[in-house]
Image: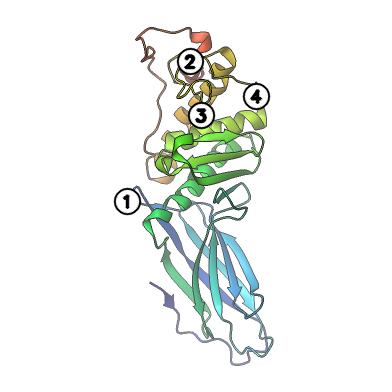
Amino acid sequence: EIRIDDEPAPDDTSAAYGIRVRGRFLHIRDGTTFMATDGMTVKIYDDDIFTDDLLGTTTTDADGIFDVVVDWEAQDGDEYPDLKVVFAAENDEVRVKPPSGSRAYTFERGVWTDFTGTDLNLVVVSPDHEVDQAIPHLLTNYTRFWRYLDDRGHDTRFLEINFPTPDDDGAWYSRTFESIQIPFDNRWSDGTHAHEYGHHVNYCLAPMPSIDYCNEICDRDYPDDCGHCRWCEEEVNSAWTEGWAQYIAHVIPPTFDALYGVPAINTREFEDLHPCHIDTLWDDPDSTEGFTGALLVDI
């Protein structure tokens, strides 16, 4: 639904005048819950045949609200602007993009040809297709993960989220490109999103040791495809690196309900200890990520 105020633009369109552009960006999580999209960049253009003129930029707040006044001045024979609004899934800290591209996902509204008002109220904007709802959700999660650390004095570097990546690869962090790969099957796994962000925190703010998961424990296809499990031992470097990421997954998502009014889903919890599911034995705590995560929770 689009609402346009009746107030007309000034008669003398040769002079610059302000146009207010506002609304709210929402997405639907897991097909059930409306959520505010946090950190979406909003760009307002005057649409043109050759090159669109960027009139102004803003960012949605934690409630998904955007509200900005842009200046427009008649030029090139145009009596009134042809307004177009582009929403980009990125901000100063996070970008959500296709794995094969370098630009953020975008959503467009408009064009409003020969716009004669001074107030364009888009009311509510949301992706048109269900398959795209995860894009603003990932942007929201990673913006809020960053804010949690930044509020405590720890600013991590810019992070790219590649989505969707192959489901067979699972979610993983690349320290080479400082990016996180999220498969379609993990699009609503807030705990997984936070876990991978934990690796980024580790890499940005502390030494991140080399790791080797190939020990025939929790390996999908040894030695070609090696993995790890929460409560089965690997080695000390894996225990630290994965345990720290599990701690981040335990700590940040549960704050969302109080901070933003919607609880996280599919979270991770490391208050309770568990034996390895393979042999039901208690593995060496020094080499097991779950125990590292639980220790950090206690600290």
Residue 227: x %, y % from top left: 49, 23
Q: Disc 4 versus disc 2: distance between alpha carbons?
A: 23 Å
Circle 2 residues within 10 Å: few <14, some 14–19, many ≥20: some
Mark 4 lies on a secondary structure that is: loop
Relative vertical location of residue 266 with respect to residue 220 in this rendering, above or below:
below
Asked if labels 3 and 4 touch by Cβ distance under 8 angstroms, the answer is no
Q: Closer to the camera, 48 or 145?
A: 48
Q: Is residue 132 left or right of residue 197?
A: left
Question: What's the residue at 45%, 34% (across, down)?
Answer: 192
Sequence order check: which comes first, mark 3 or mark 2?
Answer: 2
Amino acid type of the residue tagged 2 in the rendering: Glu
Q: Residue furthest bottom?
A: 11
- Describe residue 242's horizontal placement relative to residue 207 as left or right: left
Q: Nearer the viewer, residue 34 or 135?
A: 135
Helix, strand or loop under label 3: helix
Vertical comparison of 58 with 262: above or below: below
Q: Which amino acid is tagged 4?
A: Met
Residue 31, numbered circle:
1
Spatial CA span between label 1 and label 4 = 37 Å
Residue topped by disc 3: 248
Q: Nearer the viewer, mark 4 or mark 2?
A: 2
